[in-house]
Image (tube, helix red, strand yellow):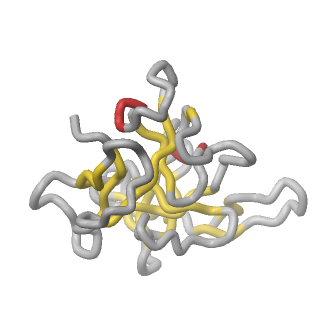
Amino acid sequence: YMCWNIEQETGFGTCVAQCSGTWGEPMCSEPWTTCVFSSLAVLALCLPTCSPLLQMCEVGEMCLPSQVPNSFVCVPDASGDEGQLFDPCEYANACDPGLVCTNPELAVECDPMAPGCCLPFCEIGSDGCPGAGQECLPWYMPGEAPPMLENVGICGVPQ
């Protein structure tokens, strides 16, 4: 285990299991977790899986896509005071919970020169997208969504 998502003010974090197995076949022994590698592959942690539509992660965390295909995991929320709807962003967790840093071309309200833009997840078939001309676009290609994530979409202008 290692201490993860440490609060700067308190110095407290959460104990998270490290992955076992091999680099080619990492494993997590705790249910509802998946092995996630840091960007530099220095850490291999078993993080809780989640649904981006429910955002049921711990306080200070958010549900985002994992580099493990077809999964979402709880990661630290690094948005601070920024990361609101249509804000520019550079990193996946730089947006508020329920939003993801994605292609700014998906909303006319986004700065097209920004590296990314904070847009909401949505449920396929819903009419709740906030941007002009946006629809709930499927997150997964047809037939590729894992169980319980078939209705996950992202608000965007169809391309």
User: Which residue is at a point 48% across and 32% down the rendered structure image?
Assistant: 110
Name the quadrant containing residue 28. Answer: bottom left
- Quadrant of the image containing the N terminus: bottom right
- Observer-nearest of 127 and 152: 127
Q: Horizontal and vertical percent for residue 153?
A: 30, 57
The residue drawn where x is 63% and y is 56% is 76
Residue that extends furthest to the bottom in the rendered view of this protein: 31
Q: At which x and y percent is residue 159?
A: 22, 34
Quick check: 15 left or right of 9? Answer: left
Number of marks in the image?
0
Q: In this view, does 97 lie to the left or right of 52?
A: right
What is the x, y in percent for residue 55? 51, 69
Left or right? Give the position of 141 relative to 119.
Answer: left
Most foreground residue, 44 or 103? 103
Name, please, the residue furthest toward the top.
113
Farthest left residue in view: 143
Give the answer, above or below, for where 78 lies relative to 107: below
Give the x, y percent position of residue 30. 46, 78
Residue at coordinates 11% horizontally, 56% vertically from top-left? 142
Residue 71 versus residue 114: which sits nearer the camera? 114
